[in-house]
Image: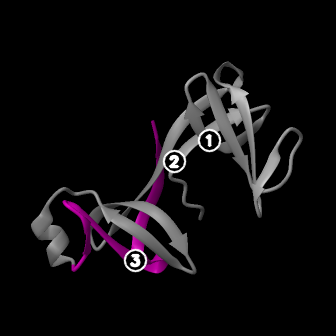
């Protein structure tokens, strides 16, 4: 399972992590490809005109954990960083979630405990 959270763009038959910037889009790759320049280990970027991308969309990964809805923010060694999306503070507090910010509750959940992992695209 791969957790995707952010912008993605299709360009020249491949899909890349992306960052829109006005009339341009920054495309990111994990390995070198034609036209991409290295900006960090295993991180390459190329800026292309927005008009040249086949599509640009925002992807979030969602799941159910302990019977409640969550957004999956990331993953690490069998654990998922999840953020409660049910909007009910008493429920979040009852689940023992960490108050990350005002009204924002997060936790680390074992990948084996989450259900209905799916992507939503906007």
Q: Can you give x and y, in whole percent of width and height, for residue 68 in the image?
A: 26, 65
Q: Secondary structure at mark 3?
A: strand
Q: Residue furthest right?
A: 34
Write the residue at 15% across / 77% down. 94
Q: Residue furthest top?
A: 51
Q: Residues within 10 Å of mark 2 (few under 14, many from 20)?
A: some
Q: Residue furthest left?
A: 90
| Contact between labelled residues 3 and 2, with CB atoms less than 8 Å apart | no
Write the residue at 54% across / 80% down. 78
| Residue stretch in magenta | 96-122
Q: Can you give x and y, in whole percent of width and height, for residue 26 in the image?
A: 66, 38
User: In this image, 25 relative to 85: left or right?
Assistant: right
Q: Mark 2 = which residue?
A: 6
Which label is found at residue 18?
1
Q: Residues within 10 Å of mark 3 (few under 14, many from 20)?
A: some
Q: Secondary structure at mark 1?
A: strand
Task: Classify 14 as above or below 118.
Answer: above
Task: Classify 37 as above or below 51.
Answer: below
């Amino acid at each position: 399972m791969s957790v995707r959270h952010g912008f993605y763009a299709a360009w020249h038959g491949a899909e890349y992590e992306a960052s829109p910037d006005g009339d341009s889009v920054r495309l990111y790759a994990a390995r070198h490809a034609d036209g991409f320049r290295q900006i960090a280990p295993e991180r390459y970027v190329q800026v292309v005109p927005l008009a040249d991308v086949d599509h640009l969309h925002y992807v979030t990964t969602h799941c159910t954990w302990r019977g409640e809805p969550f957004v999956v923010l990331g993953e690490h060694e069998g654990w998922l960083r999840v953020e409660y999306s049910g909007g009910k503070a008493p429920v979040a507090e009852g689940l023992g979630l960490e108050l990350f910010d005002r009204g924002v509750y997060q936790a680390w959940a074992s990948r084996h405990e989450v259900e209905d992992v799916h992507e939503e695209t906007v």
